[in-house]
Image (cartoon, rainbow, N blue to C red):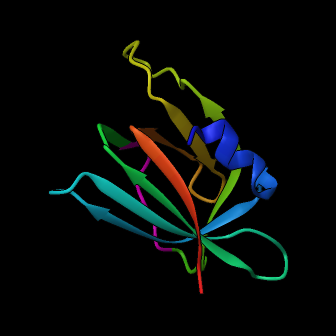
Amino acid sequence: MTMSELEMKLPNGFHDIAIKKMTLDYENKTLSMIIVIDETGKEAELFFSGMGELRLNNEIVFNGDPFLWVTDFGLEKKYADDLYSDFYFFISNLNAFLNFEVQKAELKEYP
């Protein structure tokens, strides 16, 4: 599934989702994110496989926020060194871009 197709399955797209938990399996090149997708607190899992790259352009500060707040999403985020990623999330409470390069993306229901 493409990221654009995946975004259309969410009530508000990727805008204002909250990342509650991220699990990176470096050996198997997968990333799982538990996200809060609406104001009722409903959760889902974003699952990415075939990870080629994961980049955060700012430090992660554990400042008491319970989530990482995604306020923007886009395709082909350009880096300062003229490299591109497949897509990015802008994490507003970190003032940071989280960039990904993946082969496959899935949205799974989360109990």
- Please give the count of numbered marks on the rendered protein: 0
Residue at the extreme left of the image, as rendered: 27
Q: Residue at x 76, y 57 (%)?
A: 10
Is 37 on the left-hand or right-hand side of 27? right
Prevailing secondary structure class for the magenta stretch in the rendered image:
loop
The picture places residue 59, in percent across and down from the top left corner, at: 40, 54
Q: Is residue 81 visible?
A: yes
The picture places residue 34, in percent across and down from the top left corner, at: 54, 72
The quadrant where residue 52 appears: top left
Quarter of the rendering occupied by the C terminus: bottom right
Name above or below for residue 63 compared with residue 79: below
Q: Residue at x 36, y 16 (%)?
A: 81
Q: Residue at x 43, y 43 (%)?
A: 104
Q: Residue at x 53, y 34 (%)?
A: 87
Q: Magenta segment range?
A: 55-62
Quarter of the rendering occupied by the N terminus: top right
Query: In this view of the protein, which residue sits in the foreground, 48 or 20?
Result: 48
Q: Is residue 56 within the magenta segment? A: yes
Q: Is residue 73 visible?
A: no
